[in-house]
Image (cartoon, grey):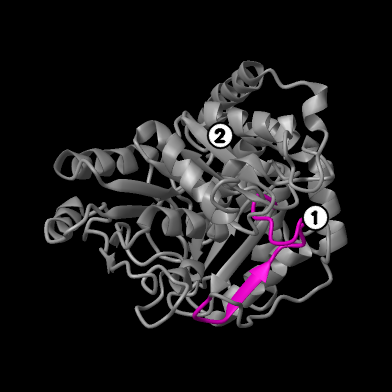
Amino acid sequence: MDPKAIELLSRAYGIDSWLIETAERAQDRVLRPWAKMDGIAQYNQAKVLEAFHYARVSEACLHGSTGYGYGDAGREKLDQVYARAFGAEAAFVRSQFVSGTHAIACALFAATAPHRPLICATGTPYDTLKPVLGKVSEPGTVAGQGSSVSIVEIAADGSIDTEAILKIASKLKDPPVVFLQRSCGYTWRESYSVGEIGSAIQAIRASVPEATFVVDNCYGEFVEDVEPAEAGADLVCGSLIKNPGGGLCAMGGYVAGKTAAVERVAARLTCPGAASHVGALPSGHREQFQGFFVAPSIVAQAVKGAIFAGRFFEELGFEVLPHPAAPRTDIIQGVKLGSRERVQAFCRGVQRASAVNAFVKPVAAPLPGYEDGIIMAGGTFVQGSSIELSCDAPMREPYAVFLQGGLSVEHSMIGAWFAAHEMEKEDLLPSAERRDLP
């Protein structure tokens, strides 16, 4: 760590020397997983570059369109780039998706119509997706359109319970749509690797060959050297203000996968007949192309920041998930804090480390789509961007925060120091002797 940076942090923000020493020790112990992430980023960068060359992206592709967006060559090339890089037959990338949840919802509605049953194979989905699933009495939801919804909890060992899924599928009249959430969401569990998702798809498809598999890929793009479409998923969904936007996209989402399945989603977002052939973006496609091009590098920075944070907070005495030495499948680092006061202090620290709105004090509040009060921190250049340094937590047991993003590992490290400093100021760090972990 740079001595001048340490001196500045100590002088300007009052961060105690022992916290800096703990951070230095943590950094020394994450060099090996950092190096592994650099190798993954290099491969993914080569893959994205090859996709640009395959699609013959030109300067003209950066310009936008108006009205219906007919004949927008840049938009069509962008779809090709995403499909190629993600190992999919087709992709549908649009600023008209208002969030990752919107892209997932369109995929689920398209895949379950007409009245096909839905099996959520990785437990209860993320909070914002629960209203999409809905109840039979709620029009406009998956259940409300006549599709049965089954939730299969994960197995005791944390794995995807394929036996329970097959047991439900065997009782269904129609082949199911199987939904798999890659990220842990607000659940204290490991996120699933592409390999684990692929194994579940293979096992289920062997018995139910007509099943359709939809994967929520949010927070996972470019963390590994393989994507869910390459592992057999029919539809893969995500947000452009997360990993694939590279910190440059101001809005949007994508779906990628099998051509027919993607076209059904496109028709759901727009309308039958127009489907993927429309969707104007007057400001042009430069941010979408450039964001995707730098995404492998930006994602690697975010993962390295998460690895550091995991080791740093473990050194400070907290339970973290995933473990700093564990393989990574998304950019999220969970830290179990154990109390409302610690969560609030942690989030104040991350907010104070932000470039924008650093002076704002985050507080828990009700948000649309969430069951509990949510506290969020992150003065991001793009509202809600979680490829930028941010964290959020539901105000419920076990009072864990979920830290994600960071356009640079240096900023992620500073954010971790600030979070620890805020807890220390209120005497909220563990009172037990600070551990010197191997």
Task: State which tag comes first along the sequence, 1 or 2.
Answer: 2
Query: Pointer 1: residues within 10 angstroms few (<14), some, or many (20+)?
Result: some
Residue 21 included in the magenta stretch of the image? no
Q: What amino acid type is highlighted by mark number 1?
A: Phe
Would you name the residue on which mark 2 appears? 34
In this view, 112 is above or below 213: below
Q: Distance between the residues labelled 1 and 2?
A: 26 Å
> Residue 324, percent across and down?
47, 46
Residue 380 included in the magenta stretch of the image? yes
Q: Which of marks 1 and 2 is in front?
A: 1
In this view, the residue in front, 422 or 321, is 321
In this view, the residue in front, 189 or 29, is 189
Instruction: State which quarter of the image contains the N terminus.
Output: top right
- The residue depicted at 55 percent of the width and 81 percent of the height is 340
In this view, 341 is above or below 269: below
Instruction: State which quarter of the image contains the C terminus.
Output: top left
Secondary structure beneath dot 1 equals: loop
User: Looking at the magenta stretch, what is its main secondary structure?
Assistant: loop
> Residue 293, percent across and down?
69, 30
Report the span colored magenta: 370-388
In this view, the residue in front, 109 or 376, is 109
Q: What amino acid type is highlighted by mark number 2?
A: Trp
Give left or right: position of 64 versus 340. right
Residue 381: mark: 1
Residue 266: mark: none
